[in-house]
Amino acid sequence: MIAPVVLLERPAEGVALIRINRPESRNALNIEVRKLLAQYLTELGEDDVTRCVVLTGNDKAFAAGADIKEMAGAGSIDMMLRGTHKLWRVIAACPKPVIAAVNGFALGGGCELAMTCDIIIAGESARFGQPEVKIGIIPGGGGTQRLIRAVGKYKAMKICLTGEVFSAREAFEMGLVSELAPDAEVEKRAIEMAQRIAGLPPLAVQQIKEVVLAGQDASLDAALRLETKASQVLFSSQDQKEGMNAFIEKRKASFKGK
């Protein structure tokens, strides 16, 4: 029996872990993997039980890029009909917080996949890069656009134009990585953070993600209006009343996502 290329695990209450499972190809992102990632993240986004998602690979690679063998002979119409751009949008659209736990290589599509997540925890030996230019193409899964928003024009230009691979430390220092961890502790750290987020009021968590992402490309005035409305709306939630009463009564709050 062929092992599934994407595994779904439940390491803790409220937490789902998605594991890319193609070790023979350093977790290269073929069409099957992309479709399963989109499927799982769509389902988890609508699942009331799941409050935070961890996305990971193995100790050798988060994802070493797209599956070059799968696309080497393709033409432009072939690529358009494959609709991979639509799958990227579905993956990025998950309303629940997604934490990337990165060990080993996160190159090309793997780096782009990590950038669709909300938090990136990287092992100290992890390596990042957008090496597409070296094989005659450009990043096509959001790399040119998400990278510039994460690290600024001049760093992004250097990364994309040279195709050079860079360390997790460099990624952390330029703002691409949220947190560094020892290689052996990356997944554990990501699950712990996911548990902490899962214990917080789900409506507020989802509103933070929505407002941050919607506001980053809007004017400051428009973004502040989004923030104000989201903040006001949450005062109609049971979780807001529970959270504030628990604070006043000096007890632990129990959030229901209502």
Image: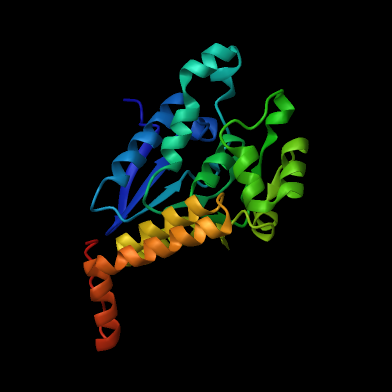
Q: Residue at x 61, y 38 (%)?
A: 143
In this picture, residue 71 sits left or right of residue 225: right
Please identify the quadrant where the N terminus is shown: top left
User: x, y (%) of residue 7?
Assistant: 35, 39
- The image quadrant of residue 209 is bottom left
- The image quadrant of residue 229 is bottom left
Q: Is residue 118 visible?
A: no
Q: Residue at x 56, y 55 (%)?
A: 122
Front residue of 44 and 223: 223
Seen in the picture, residue 172 relative to 70 is either above or below; the reply is below
Please identify the quadrant where the C terminus is shown: bottom left
User: x, y (%) of residue 29?
Assistant: 50, 31
Seen in the picture, residue 58 relative to 136 is either above or below; the reply is below
Front residue of 79 and 242: 242
How many numbered callouts?
0
User: x, y (%) of residue 30?
Assistant: 48, 26
Front residue of 60 and 6: 6
Q: Residue furthest bottom?
A: 249
By what rule are the colours in the image chosen?
A: rainbow
Q: Residue at x 48, y 50 (%)?
A: 214
User: x, y (%) of residue 224?
Assistant: 50, 62
Q: Is residue 237 visible?
A: yes
Q: Residue at x 76, y 36 (%)?
A: 161
Seen in the picture, residue 191 relative to 84 is either above or below; the reply is below
